[in-house]
Amino acid sequence: MEALAVRLSGLDPHVEGALRIVAFYDTLMRRRVDLSALARASAGLAECVTGVGLHGTGRTIRVAPDGREAAGPTGPASGTAPVVLDEEEIGRVWLERSGPAGPLDEVLLDRLALAVAGAVERYGPARTTMADPALVELVVSAETDEPARARALRLLGFAAGPPVRVAAVRSPRLPLDQVGGVVCPGRSVKAARIGEVGVILASAVDRTLFPAGVRAGIGAADKPDLAWREARTALRLTTAREPVLLHAELGALALLAEVPREVLRGNPDVAALVRVAGDPGNSEEEPLDSRESREALDTLEAYCAAGSLRRAADVLHLHHSSVARRIALIGRALSVDLTTPTGLTRARVALTAWRLLGD
């Protein structure tokens, strides 16, 4: 390293300094120093206040060049770099120079960020959100024995005792780790994909924090394998109006998920709703066009959720007479009087079954 630095310094006056910084942090990493020691060593090397911050724990370390904790509020950063572990940003490191950044600050911050990631991984928990899918699958699989499940949870960073909450997630735009971090801020949370569905394991899940555009079902059982099954059922029944569902709120409707698909499809009410949705299935009747289908389903969903024409009209921003005409047309298509309690119940059950078929 020293000989290489001497040869290269003739080409670039900063090369020798950069290589010395690399060697400096290599030594610190070999000695397995912790975050505080890394911050102190970096502040002395940079001759300015140096900071280390971790997103998951909220921990921040600021050290002055003399090795003491920096006093006063955090100053403006003259340079900063992300701390990345398992392809996820888990924190930041920065320098607080009173003047412009130094010519080797970028190298120093890059090596400091690498060293911090190594220290966090070593002394953990790592506080990353994305997890090994194999471990997550062990946790939620019905075939896993309890000792293996408990070991997988420990490896994922969950303490023994409190139940782990399970959510099944579809997020077409946001990365799964971001969703997990949002719905369980500052607490243990892990995420992975099993097939096309995302799994979030968390010490707690706040349904109100799921970002727009994300669909999620949340299990209620204390056993992770049962909670995963419940979460997937709830996810299948989400809609644009109800993008997040708790399995505990489904009640008896959850039983429909146990019914074979061919039995659901063969029910007259469900078959009629399938035709209204624009899929004639085993019927020879002409389906509605796509606009009519969307209007019909939107109106029926709003009516079933609201329970009355006027409340459905408020949700749809239509006059109640317009909603009444639509409901009458849908009722004729389904051969059900939707204005009666029995008809409304049949429509709710048929709509739930249709969503399950759509999954």
Image (spheres, helix red, strand yellow):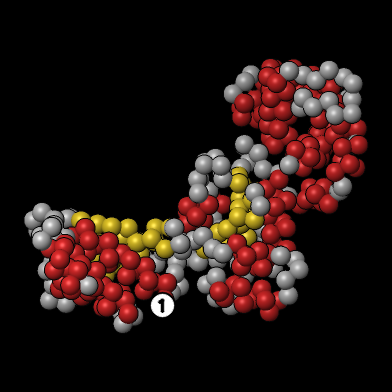
Which quarter of the rendered picture does the C terminus lie within?
top right
The vertical placement of 316 against 8, above or below, is: above
Callout count = 1
Quarter-wise, where is residue 74 in the image? Answer: bottom left
Relative depth, front residue between 22 and 152: 22
Point 66% across, 68% down: residue: 138
Point 73% across, 51% down: residue: 233
Residue sitting at the far left: 99
Q: Is residue 71 left or right of residue 290?
A: left
Residue sitting at the far bottom: 31
SS at mark 1 in the image: helix
Quarter-wise, where is residue 325 in the image? Answer: top right
Characterize the local packing of mark 1: few (<14), some (14-19) or many (20 or more) Cα atoms within 10 angstroms: few
Circle 1 is placed at which residue position?
123
Relative depth, front residue between 79 and 315: 79
Residue 26: % across, % down: 28, 74
Q: Is residue 220 left or right of residue 349?
A: left
- Residue 152 visible at all: yes
The vertical placement of 219 against 309, above or below, is: below
Point 79% across, 40% down: residue: 357
Residue 304: % across, % down: 73, 34
Relative depth, front residue between 215 and 269: 215
Point 89% across, 25% down: residue: 283
The vertical placement of 45 against 197, above or below, is: below
Amino acid at circle 1: Tyr
